[in-house]
Image (cartoon, rainbow, N blue to C red):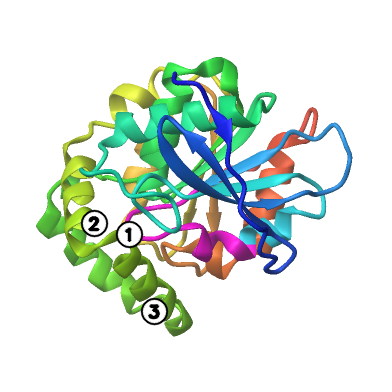
Amino acid sequence: MAELQLGMAAPRPAAGLTSEWRLVDGLRTHTRHAAGPTTEAPPVVLVHGLAVSHRYLTPLAVALATTHQVYVPDLPGFGLTQRPRGAYDVRQHAEHLAAWLAAYRLPPVCLLGHSFGAEVAATLAANHPGSVRALVLAGPTSDPAARSRRAQFGRWLVDSLREAPLQAPILARDVWNARPWRVLATLSHSVRNAIEADLVRITAPTLVLTGERDPIAPPRWRDQVTRLVPDANLVVVPGAPHNAATTNPTAVADAIRRLLAPHSALTDR
């Protein structure tokens, strides 16, 4: 990994979170950070999905900040992070995130990846197991039964009818920040990524978390993901669509706390 330097701009508070920028492998990388309480609880890192950014994960970050330090980095080319010339594939994003963890000198973290971010998180956990204390795969992509851009877009259209309408302006802003061509190129990387090869190599305790009404990570696929990871439990958020982390932040935060609690037992659904 390249040398990592601090490159801070003036922090911008929002819902108790501040913005930070650090130079990570040559890219000025933006992170939302909630300081959280001073405890021995592991920090939680939230990794956003395709086309979006830290913005839609803010409700979950706020819900977790009462008990944990929370970090929400923007992946290269998305949100407020510098845009590289091309669109990173899953492994490039995972290596950038590993470099980001080194920049912050964090102890092993609880890593949550949502949707495409779950692919990035799975690759990081498989390739850098010492960096991940626990893993949450929220609405992981992509289901082998719909592993094409056309099929994924069709499922996204179904999901968009089930999501809260207030998410639409956030999505539009994030797509504009990333540029539509980057979103499409990243979708191509996603459907070519066989996440199964990473899932079987994960050693961290893992929570597979989906919404009950999630068409992008449907029941058969979420069950398969849970079986493939050696130490995994499944939690389904009742009534929730794909973006359960946004629309049901309290339920998701509680599930993460149970995962991290000593000697806790998750009840599979």
Q: What is the residue that sits farthest to the right in this orientation?
A: 38
- State which region is magenta: 47-59
Magenta run includes residue 48: yes
Give me the C-alpha separation between circle 1 and circle 3. 12 Å
- On the image, numbered disc 3 is attached to which residue? 168
Q: Are marks 1 and 2 in contact (CB under 8 Å)?
A: yes
Mark pair 1, 2: CA separation: 5 Å
- Looking at numbered disc 2 in the image, what kind of residue is underneath it? Val
- What residue is shown with label 2? 183
Along the line of sight, which residue is nearer the eye, 34 or 103?
103
Of callouts 1 and 3, the N-terminal one: 1
Which quadrant of the figure has residue 76? Answer: top left
**Residue 230 x %, y %:** 48, 21
What is the tally of numbered marks visible in this picture? 3
In this rendering, the answer to whether 247 lies above or below 98 is: below
The residue at 47%/50% (across/down) is 74
Residue carrying label 1:
51
The three-letter amino acid code for the residue at tag 1 is Ala
Image quadrant where one finds the N terminus: top left
Q: Earlier in the sequence, mark 1 or mark 2?
A: 1
Disc 1 element: loop
Q: Nearer the viewer, residue 28 or 182?
A: 28
> In front: mark 2 or mark 3?
2
> Mark 2 and mark 3: span between their CA atoms?
16 Å
Image height check: is 213 above or below 117? below
